[in-house]
Image (tube, grey):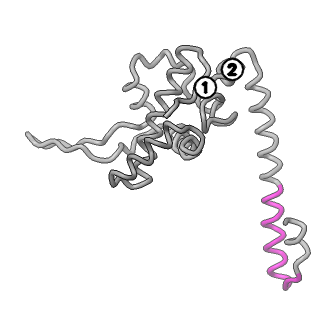
Amino acid sequence: MINWLKEIDLSLSLRLTLNGLLEDYERLAEKKKCITKQITELSRTSRYEQDVKLLRSVPGIGLVIAMAFLTELENMNRFKTFDQLCSFIGFVPSTKSSGEKESVGEITSRAQVILRPLLIEASWIAVQKDPALACRYAELCHKGLMPNKAIIRIAKKLLRRIRFVLKNKELYKLEVV
């Protein structure tokens, strides 16, 4: 594809613009390759190797997401409860209160900016690979929940499973529906 773009017959100004963009793309692709290699090397160290193996057994969790979780969380045991972990990630509802009135809204905008989006992306993959999560997702959508809101609920379930795997040092087992 890149070679095809390099060979397109264009005016001088368009050619200069496209060449600049292609150079940027190639530089970023090389940087991504280098960073992925560094992440892979780090994942093979004694500190991360076992936990990476455990996390990669969870549907939707690959090397990059596993390492992001392990490096951002540092230690799962620092969260005494699942609710504390949810609060850290940003899976708690926002609340508004005034006097005696209190309302609960969407999930809070305050979130862990790296892990929450990664967990949501992993959830989209997990609903394709895990029959129990797929069933729950379909059930939520059938009840009228919009897909983007349903996947947030799935992400919270996935987070609970990630916590279980790391705390109990057990590989993830797909649930039977």
Quadrant location of the N terminus in the rendered image: bottom right
What span is colored magenta in the figure?
Answer: 9-26
- Indicate the amino acid at tag 2: Tyr
Residue bearing the label numbered 2: 48
The correct choice, above or below, for 163 with respect to 19 in the image is above
Q: Residues within 10 Å of mark 2 (few under 14, many from 20)?
A: some
Q: Say whether disc 2 or disc 1 marks the residue closer to the N-terminus.
A: 2
Name the outermost residue toward the front.
Answer: 177
Residue bearing the label numbered 1: 70
* Majority SS type along the magenta span: helix
- Where residue 146 sits in the image (x, y, percent)? 39, 55
How many numbered marks, from 0 up? 2
- Where residue 80 sits in the image (x, y, percent)? 41, 16
Q: In this view, does 31 lie to the left or right of 137?
A: right
Q: Is residue 7 left or right of residue 13?
A: right
The correct choice, above or below, for 60 with respect to 11 in the image is above
Towards the viewer: 116 or 10: 116
- Indicate the amino acid at tag 1: Leu
Q: In this view, does 23 lie to the left or right of 177?
A: right
The correct choice, above or below, for 56 with respect to 113 in the image is above
